[in-house]
Amino acid sequence: MKVKNRRFGILGMARSGISAAAKIKELGGIAFISEYKNETEITNSKQIKETFQCEFGGHTKKLLQNDVLILSPGIPRDIPILKEAEKQNIKVISEIEFSYRIKHPHSKIIAITGSNGKSTTVSLIHHILQTAEYKSILAGNIGTAFSSYPIEKENIDFIVLELSSFQLEIIDKFKADVAAILNITPDHLDRYDSFDDYAETKFNIFKNQNFQDLAILNLDDITSIKFTGKINSDLKCFSLNSNTDIYFKENSIVFGSENFSTRNAAIQGPHNIANMMCAILAVSPFHIERDIIQQSLETFSPLAHRLEFVKEVDGIKFYNDSKATNTDSVKYALQSFDRPIRIIMGGAGKGEDYSILIPYLQERAKKVYLTGDTIDEMKKAFEGSVEIASIKEFEDVIQKAFSDSKEGDIIVLSPACTSYDRFKNFEERGNTFKKIVSGLKK
């Protein structure tokens, strides 16, 4: 894509928007950033104004004076200014699409999406590649924008991308050498017309792939398998329950003639075994030695806020699973312990049916502690099925779970909701949980 002397309008001053603007400026283009929020609501607004042409408080027709518009992932595609841009044949792309078009052709892309497990899987793939001494970068939804790296230069071997459904909504020419969907379960139903609409958006990750590229699916995920007709590349599957291209059997991952032990793996639980299988498949075209992969499984550092062990207080263990923002993540959390747990749930809802958790809670939860904006909704879903405590304040609900516990108990924050009712993001929620736990005393 030609950038020099071209005008780019960027909708949104979040991380990806600012990164795209900086890259455009670096490559000789002209960036104009438009933000819906007021200037006082934007961190570093003064610095942004000094660096770029910009506007605050709404998307105006100034955007229509640009050659290309770059849309940040959180912004809906049906807002009036984008409809007007479409009428005027102004191209609208995502930051992912923009970055793909300027990246050096030498760099290979491994892209991962799914409702759960994305961050752990891409981080493990990145770790394997680095252990094998490849130059690898990790970008996308995991926290660092794709365009923030020197991707136009030749010295990057692999670009490992975590992609959300929002980032996959506008895919035109983007193509991954390896693409995977870990699973598709109800999520973001407040954004999409239906669950199938959400699932089809995920499948954009395979768009533009051909027979030379690798597609990876979870054979255990009914929804993913339903859409296999959309794949034109070499398809391989992983499974916890069936013999397929790569599968799990007796504490080992079996891949052809090779076995990878999971006994000493840094991450545990059935969901993480699935993540490991996907990671092994993702690097399989690049002929990395078996011993390097096995070493990587054992030396990988687990990510924060994903069933993260926090502390043991008076024989009571606390785990931070703040990243569990949907019901499927909570299922994984419940299945990851060998005895019933005390689980803290609640936050800002996304339109999910919480009642689907009842059989899992009945089998694996000692008591359910509800908090946040979804208290009433969850209480209605669970009442009469499991023991419940409903406590509005976040610190109070942790204190209550602790006071109810005895030596040997496990308390897990696994909300099944986003954090936006009272926190900036899941990281802030998890860090607040850890801070409160650190100060607990019987």
Image: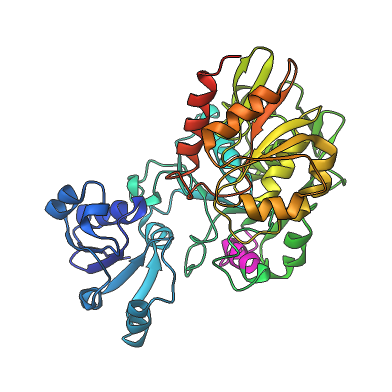
Over which residues does the magenta segment extend? 198-212
Q: Position of residue 195 (x, y in %)?
A: 67, 67
**Who's the residue at 30% across and 72% down the image?**
68
Above or below, 129 against 439 in this view is below
Say whether residue 43 is left or right of residue 397. Answer: left
Q: Residue furthest top?
A: 314
Task: Let me know if residue 218 appears in the view.
Answer: no
**Who's the residue at 12% across and 52% down the image?**
50
- Picture quarter containing residue 316? top right
**Who's the residue at 56% across and 26% down the image?**
301
Nearest the viewer among 139 and 439 is 439
Characterize the magenta stretch by its predominant secondary structure: helix
Nearest the viewer among 191 and 300 is 191
Q: Position of residue 126 (x, y in %)?
A: 53, 36
- Picture quarter containing residue 197? bottom right
Q: Is residue 207 magenta?
A: yes
Say whether residue 171 is left or right of residue 90. Answer: right
Q: Position of residue 257 (x, y in %)?
A: 82, 35
- Picture quarter containing residue 11? bottom left
Q: In the rendered view of the protein, which quadrant contains the N terminus?
A: bottom left
Number of marks in picture: 0
Q: Is residue 224 magenta?
A: no
**Who's the residue at 36% across and 45% down the image?**
154
Nearest the viewer among 85 and 210 is 85
Q: In the rendered view of the protein, which quadrant contains the C terminus?
A: top right
